[in-house]
Image (cartoon, rainbow, N blue to C red):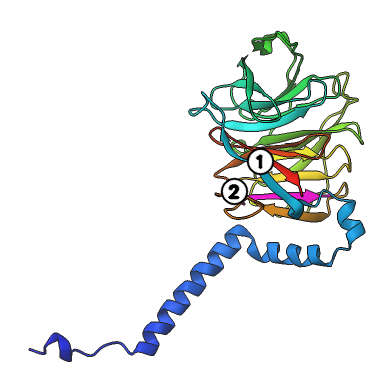
Amino acid sequence: MISAALKPRRPLHKRWYFWTLLVAVVAYIVAAVLHWDDRGELWLRETLQDKAERQASIWLPDYHAVIDAKRLPGMEKDEASDITYNPVTRTLFSVMGKNPFLVELTLQGEVLRKIPLDGWSNPEAVTALPDGRLAIVDERDHNLTIVSLAADTRTLNMADFTPYDLGPSQDQNKAFEAIAWDARHQRLLLGEERPPALYAIKTDGNGPLVSEKQRLDADDLDMRNLSAIAIDPRTGHRLLLSADSHLLMEYDENGKQLSFMALLMGMNGLKDTIPRAEGVTMDDQGTVYIVSEPNLFYAFRKQ
């Protein structure tokens, strides 16, 4: 019998080659999944933009977390699905999808009130209209409902409003999950989660919807899924959020990529990676707010 010490061993250079190849394959898969190659291209384009172009945009690289992973109390078993800034009340409204309700927040993430949503199945998106009403998208029921609420509103019932049928999606289980008010073009922007797609519905923001949804040309939606949309009221630029890609992207009004922010540990002042970013909004001062499942709240300001 040959002793273990005398058994032939695999040459060191072959073992080194095997592990190098394995690491390279894993790195390639991770890079493809996270679109690091595309991020690298965009980062290069960012470095080539001049000062005037940066000042004319939101420019996400300059943003830094000022509120990092604040927990919304009493919502540990809920799923924060979206958030919107209401310029009338100067507060934030976040919609919870697992147990349907709205929560009104201060700009510091303090809870002001919870408003149950009776009749909604899976509210996934919310945006504020200029008159203070809220438009809520139910992903499971494929509808959009515009609701009014007062300072003393304690519950909302869908039977009191008229839902708007959004029609079928390419993937019924990954349907409409994003909405934002576009003041410059007097329309609502809608986003399908997967595959990512954008639509528009015309309205003046004060009356009813006045058109069927129209598909927008958006060939450069470079993300694995689309979780939320926000519109910068100052520039008209779009913020598109992807939970699967851990990414917030800035696009201009024509759909051109301008800047991005990776929602990863150590980036833009984040202590830890945002686990699942599902909602984004921006106020009239340029502060960006993000909510993540299950009940995490973030705020970013430009330095």
Task: From this view, report whether residue 33 is shown above or below residue 295.
Answer: below
Task: From this view, report whether residue 229 is shown above or below residue 134.
Answer: below
The answer, for residue 167, to whether it is visible in the render is no
Q: Is residue 246 magenta?
A: yes
Per the picture, the main secondary structure of the magenta-coloured stretch is strand
Q: Is residue 212 magenta?
A: no
Going by the numbered disc 2, the residue's amino acid type is Asp
Residue labelled with disc 1:
227
Asked if residue 211 lies left or right of residue 70, the reply is: right
Q: Quadrant of the N terminus?
A: bottom left
**Picture quadrant of residue 85:** top right
Which of disc 2 and disc 1 is earlier in sequence?
1
Tell me where the magenta segment starts and ends, as one range. Answer: 245-251
Residue labelled with disc 2:
244
Q: Residue at x 69, y 33 (%)?
A: 168
Q: Residue furthest left?
A: 1
Q: Secondary structure at mark 2?
A: loop
